[in-house]
């Protein structure tokens, strides 16, 4: 796998993972159905999916070559990027769909 392909793979996985909590009414994506799902569960799912996405990126980086150590700045930027990628799901769940269901 080329490094450019790996970058796109991680970005697409992050985009999908960041929006999953907003499109599913199940707890942790496989648990019982909850309508409406509390915000705390969505934040927990978002944090867990962010960790899984980081793990995927680290695994691909280790497979391509030597894994580089990261400082706190990397994790802060990655968290901000993950939250930004989840914005379309947030808008659909809370702003657009919520207005039409009421």
Image (cartoon, rainbow, N blue to C red):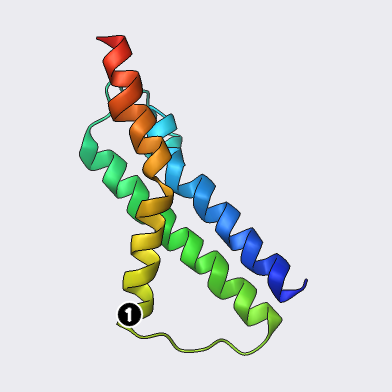
Tell me residue 3's x, y (percent): 70, 75
Q: Secondary structure at mark 1?
A: helix
Specify few, some or many for label 1: CA neighbours under 10 Å numbering under 14, 14-19, or 20 or more: few
Residue name at image x 63 percent, y 72 percent: 60
Is residue 35 at least partly visible in the picture?
no
Q: Position of residue 86 (x, y in %)?
A: 40, 46
- Which image quadrant for residue 69? bottom left
Q: Is residue 6 above or below residue 14?
A: below
Q: Residue at x 62, y 81 (%)?
A: 62
Say whether residue 23 is visible: yes
Q: Residue furthest top?
A: 102
Expressed as whole percent of the image width and height from the top left, the position of residue 63 reads: 68, 79
Image quarter of the C terminus: top left
Q: Is residue 59 left or right of residue 86?
A: right
The residue indicated by pointer 1 is 73
Q: Residue at 72% of width from left, 66% of height from top?
A: 5
Q: Nearer the viewer, residue 31 or 96?
A: 96
- The x and y percentages for residue 27 are 35, 34
Q: Nearer the viewer, residue 85 or 43?
A: 85
| Image height of 51 relative to 76, above or below | above
- The residue depicted at 34 percent of the width and 37 percent of the height is 90
Q: Nearer the viewer, residue 40 or 99?
A: 99
Horizontal side, residue 65 vs residue 102: left or right: right
Q: Please determine whether, in this image, residue 45 is positioned above or below residue 33.
A: below
Image quadrant holding the N terminus, namely bottom right
Residue at the extreme right: 1
Q: Total of numbered circles in the picture?
A: 1
């Amino acid at each position: 796998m080329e490094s450019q392909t790996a970058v796109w793979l991680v970005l697409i996985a992050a985009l999908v993972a960041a929006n999953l909590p907003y499109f599913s009414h199940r707890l942790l994506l496989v648990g019982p159905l909850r309508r409406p799902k509390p915000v705390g569960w969505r934040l927990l799912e978002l944090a867990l999916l962010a960790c899984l996405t980081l793990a995927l990126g680290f695994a691909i980086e280790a497979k391509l070559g030597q894994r580089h150590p990261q400082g706190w700045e990397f994790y802060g930027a990655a968290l901000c990027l993950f939250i930004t990628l989840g914005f379309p799901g947030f808008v659909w769940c809370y702003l657009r769909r919520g207005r039409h269901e009421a």
